[in-house]
Image (cartoon, rainbow, N blue to C red):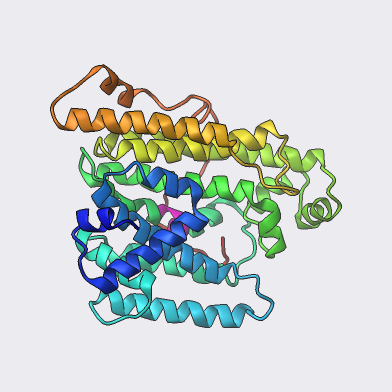
Amino acid sequence: MTDRELDAARITDPALRAAYRHCRALNARHGRTYFLATRLLPVERRPAVHALYGFARWADDIVDSLDPGAGAGRRDAVLEDLARSLDRGLRGGRTDEPVVLALADTARRYAIAHAHFTDFMAAMRSDLVVTDYPRYADLCGYMHGSAAVIGLQMLPVLGTVVPREEAAPHASALGVAFQLSNFLRDVGEDLDRGRVYLPADLLAAHGVDRPLLRWSRDTGRPDRRITAALREFEALTRGVYRQAAPGVGMLDPVSRPCIRTAFVLYGGILDAIAREGYPVLHRRAVVPRRRRAAVAADGLVRVMAARLRARGRPGGRAAMAERPLPSRVVDAAPRPAVSPVSPASPVSREVV
């Protein structure tokens, strides 16, 4: 993290500055889309986003460790250590864990509800024991803690032009939409970890089960039944993006370019998957570099427009900040039967 960002956020304590830098490094290494979008935020808000993402990334890395020596029992113990450190940090106690130190400071500065972090940790624990979801409703229970609360954590940092409770459902939906995109992109990698996040009833409707997914992964051969199931999951995900879209305009204008960029880039993952014929069991689909650069450039234009508007100097470009999101991202896909922002606690099964 640059000294400019830390200075702008008035973070002066040397240990805290080091902790925030650690979180920024995690973001830069693991979250290319998030990191790119975060650079469009006002400089003083970036450290908080890095802290929130850095903590989530650290916990997720514990759960997803593929180290043969790190069995479920060892991962559970490490996760419990992190949870205890988090509890101490949020209560104002001492912690030497950098991601917790930065997170606790961010939670205090922005008055973020501690329940969001508790729910997140519950979802991470479920990942150690839950390997599939019978229905979409079950998956929604998991995603409340693993994704929806991430959107809620972000709201105080981003700021809103409406009462926060009005923007909250859309922020929750956006967190879920991002995670659903990841689930579709990472079907093969998750299967190697022993997990299937696509609901079993959705798969069964197309004649797909875990053994068929395993066969396709192992042989590298596609199957029309799998493709049909993946296409339906894509349509479901686009429906959640539709639910999230109105929330972008509810944010502080200077925060909108950041979230809009993440929105478009994550929606682009779906575009890439569909364009390549749903190859997710065999390789990861990615948004082309040229497309990422174009979206980032558009975001920079919107940042400048928002700053001009905030200074009371509207210009010709300012209107660009209010253009609707691309229709290919929020197309007319059927809405899921179960709301993705249900406050249900994570199911005893498991599911960024």
Q: Where is residue 181 in the image (x, y as percent from the top left)?
A: 56, 45
Given residues 99 and 155, the one toward you in this image is 99
Q: Quadrant of the N terminus?
A: bottom left
**On the image, which quarter does residue 64 sit in?**
bottom right
Q: Position of residue 26 (x, y in %)?
A: 46, 61
Give the left or right position of residue 271, taking residue 209 as reference: left
Given residues 322 and 216, the one toward you in this image is 322
* Residue plotted at (27% across, 27% down): 305
The secondary structure making up most of the magenta span is: helix
Q: How many labels does the image show?
A: 0
**On the image, which quarter does residue 138 sit in?**
bottom right
Residue 118 visible here: yes
| Picture layout, residue 36 above or below residue 200 | above
Q: Does the magenta stretch include residue 160?
A: no
Q: Position of residue 296 (x, y in %)?
A: 43, 35
Q: Does the magenta stretch include residue 147?
A: yes
* Residue plotted at (51% across, 31% down): 329
Given residues 341 and 41, the one toward you in this image is 41
Give the left or right position of residue 335, taking residue 341 as reference: right
The segment highlighted magenta reads: 144-148
Q: Where is residue 121 in the image (x, y as percent from the top left)?
A: 43, 69
